Image (spheres, grey):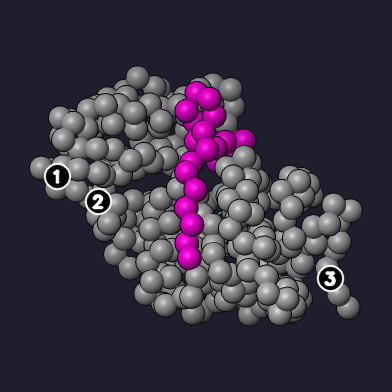
């Protein structure tokens, strides 16, 4: 029995791997190219920018919506992660998405959490990986599975998750996956807050406190011509102005290696920040130019 759900707007919601593979194969036989946007749902304008870019890049656009338990640690927000499939599908329809792949956990992991994992390596244990052990192994494992299921020509990610983008690019390179990785700039609110599915957890006061992330990045960018130490000091000082935000890390990395830059580094670099605002953990990043 087919589990494909056809919506009035033409988007088809597919929940099994076999059916999605069959549909994509049929489109491929007709010569269609495929762009893929993996998501965990709770879609916002940042996701929609990825989908709009995907629409420009290929004939067929597939969006997956799957909250991947493998990338959540014990005590993280797996249970409270928003699940809003109907609203997500409605948001995707005007963008002309052909297929939404929304598998159950049992469909993706029929034998329980997979014992085979993609290992993210050294960079996978830094920054987000240090605060969330196993997160990037779980993320890469599901992305590898999804890429094998969808077999796209291009996969689209957001720069907001810069470390994720770095690790996916490296996996694609290391495992010789035959596809392009396209990265779309972070979408921000007018006041600078990076869009995130987790922003919906912020109360009014927390929403205002959360601006500290983009303010700290701006402070680092302004001080970057004076060097690494100055940039870091200004960023940390920005947190001093905000009660209620707990800095997890602020680091300046070499975009080519994702390792921290040396104290005397100069040229293009990437500043990364993570902080807890109330019960909500937020991340952001920004390119900077070190003097
Ligand atoms: O960025 C996300 O939403 C997730 O990490 C991803 C890439 C969909 C894998 O679960």
Q: Position of residue 258 (x, y in %)?
A: 29, 55
Q: Which residue, given by chain and number where applicable, does mark 2 sit on?
A: 254
Considering only order in the chain, which callout, 2 or 3, is on the residue closer to the N terminus? 3
Q: Considering the numbered disc 1 on the image, is that residue within a helix, a strand or a loop?
A: loop
Q: Which residue, given by chain and number where applicable, does mark 3 sit on?
A: 3
Above or below — where is 235 with respect to 73? above
Badge 2 crowding class, 10 Å Cα cut-off, few under 14, some 14 to 19, many 20 or more, is: some
Callouts 2 and 1 close, C-beta under 8 Å:
yes
Q: Which residue, given by chain and number where applicable, does mark 1 sit on?
A: 265
Above or below — where is 102 with respect to 85? below
Q: Can residue 200 be seen in this view?
A: yes
Question: Residue shown at 37%/74% (left/top)?
Answer: 174
Q: Is residue 79 visible?
A: no
Q: Give the range drawn in magenta.
A: 180-201
Of the pair 100 and 125, the residue shown nearer to us: 100
Above or below — where is 93 with respect to 191? below
Of the pair 192 and 10, the residue shown nearer to us: 10
In the picture, residue 35 is in which quadrant? Answer: bottom right
Taking the image as shown, residue 103 lies to the left or right of residue 179, namely right
Of the pair 117 and 91, the residue shown nearer to us: 91
């Amino acid at each position: 029995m087919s589990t494909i759900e056809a919506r009035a707007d033409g988007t088809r919601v597919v929940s099994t791997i076999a059916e999605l593979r069959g549909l994509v194969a049929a489109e491929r036989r007709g010569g269609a190219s495929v762009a893929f946007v993996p998501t965990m749902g709770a879609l916002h304008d940042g996701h929609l920018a990825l989908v709009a870019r995907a629409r420009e890049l290929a004939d067929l656009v597939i969006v997956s919506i799957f909250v991947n338990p493998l990338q959540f640690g014990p005590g993280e927000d797996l249970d409270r992660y928003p699940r809003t499939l109907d609203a997500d599908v409605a948001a995707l329809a005007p963008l002309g998405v052909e297929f939404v792949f929304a598998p159950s956990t049992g469909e993706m992991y029929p034998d329980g959490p997979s014992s085979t994992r993609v290992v993210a390596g050294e960079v996978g244990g830094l920054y987000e990986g240090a605060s969330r052990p196993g997160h990037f192994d779980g993320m890469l494992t599901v992305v590898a599975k999804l890429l094998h299921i969808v077999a796209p020509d291009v996969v689209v990610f957001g720069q907001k998750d810069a470390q994720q983008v770095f690790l996916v690019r490296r996996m694609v390179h290391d495992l010789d996956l035959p596809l392009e990785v396209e990265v779309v700039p972070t979408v921000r609110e007018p006041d600078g807050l990076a869009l995130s599915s987790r922003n919906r957890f912020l109360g009014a006061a927390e929403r205002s406190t959360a601006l500290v992330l983009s303010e700290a990045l701006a402070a680092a960018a302004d001080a970057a011509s004076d060097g690494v130490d100055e940039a870091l000091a200004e960023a940390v000082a920005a947190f001093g102005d905000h009660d209620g935000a707990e800095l997890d890390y602020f680091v300046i990395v070499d975009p080519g290696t994702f390792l921290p830059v040396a104290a005397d580094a100069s040229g293009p670099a990437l500043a990364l920040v993570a902080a807890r605002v109330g019960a909500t953990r937020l991340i952001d990043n920004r390119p900077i130019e070190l003097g």
